[in-house]
Image (cartoon, rainbow, N blue to C red):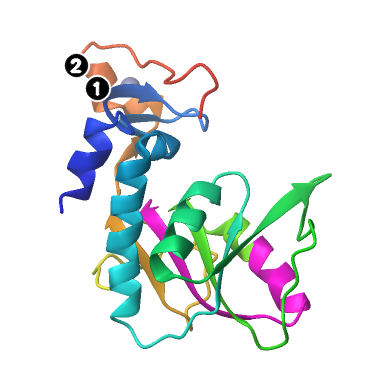
Amino acid sequence: MDIKKIYMGADALLKGHFKLSSGNHSEYYLQSAKVLEDPQTAKLLAEALAKEIKSSDIEIDTVCAPALGGLIAGFALATALDVRFIFAERVNGEMTIRRGFEVDKGERILMCEDIITTGGSAMEAAAVVKELGGEIVGVAALANRGFCKREGSDIETQANCKLPQDIPFFALADFTFEMYDPAECPLCKEGSEAIKPGSRGN
Ligand code: ZN
């Protein structure tokens, strides 16, 4: 399965000349929610990810996703793995688990995101799960932005990766692309102008 082609086809991976929210320029832009717009594609991707996870030897009781980004991917993955699904959400900036969701002591929980950049939100949610007695057995995402090393990939973990190194990280593909200081952007040098993708910048 060509994951990047699926993202491209769904306009979830754009190629051009983009101005990122950081101010840097890039030839690519990932708007990962777009790939889940088609429920059948979401199902297909989640099943591929579940297959990869099942081939490892970790046991999972529950998938937990941080809202909002991880909700659809997490739900689809839990369906494919045939396990329980819960989510964490921010209340006044603080990650919490509400809505009557309970976590048993020793419950084996897989954290799931649509995309892992540094893994910050996933780890904030994981900390809440652990406080409630759960055990984090792994992290999963449909896409990996390339700062953390996933199972089966040879890219190296970067200093900004927040995922723990002692649990597996599963993702379908690495979306690693160069970011340029506008002053040194080769696309600017070629004469094109960087555009801000999406009206909401995300
Ligand atoms: Zn540029």
Contact (CB < 8 A) between labels 1 and 2? yes
- Amino acid type, mark 1: Leu
On the image, the x and y values in percent for residue 102 come to 75, 71
**Residue 141: within the magenta?**
yes
Nearer to us in this view, 158 or 1: 1
Nearer to us in this view, 130 or 162: 130
**Residue 143: within the magenta?**
yes
- Amino acid type, mark 2: Glu
Question: Crowding near pointer 1: few (<14 within 10 Å), some, many (20+)?
Answer: some
Nearer to us in this view, 58 or 102: 102
Disc sitting over residue 187 in the figure: 1
Query: Residue at position x 32%, y 63% from top?
Result: 49
Query: Residue at position x 41%, y 70% from top?
Result: 81
- The quadrant of the image that shows the N terminus is bottom left
On the image, the x and y values in percent for residue 74 come to 50, 57
Q: Residue 152 falls in which quadrant of the image?
A: bottom left
Q: CA distance from mark 1 to mark 2?
A: 5 Å
The residue tagged 2 is: 190
State which region is magenta. 124-145
Q: Mark 1: is the Cβ under 8 angstroms from ligand 1?
A: yes
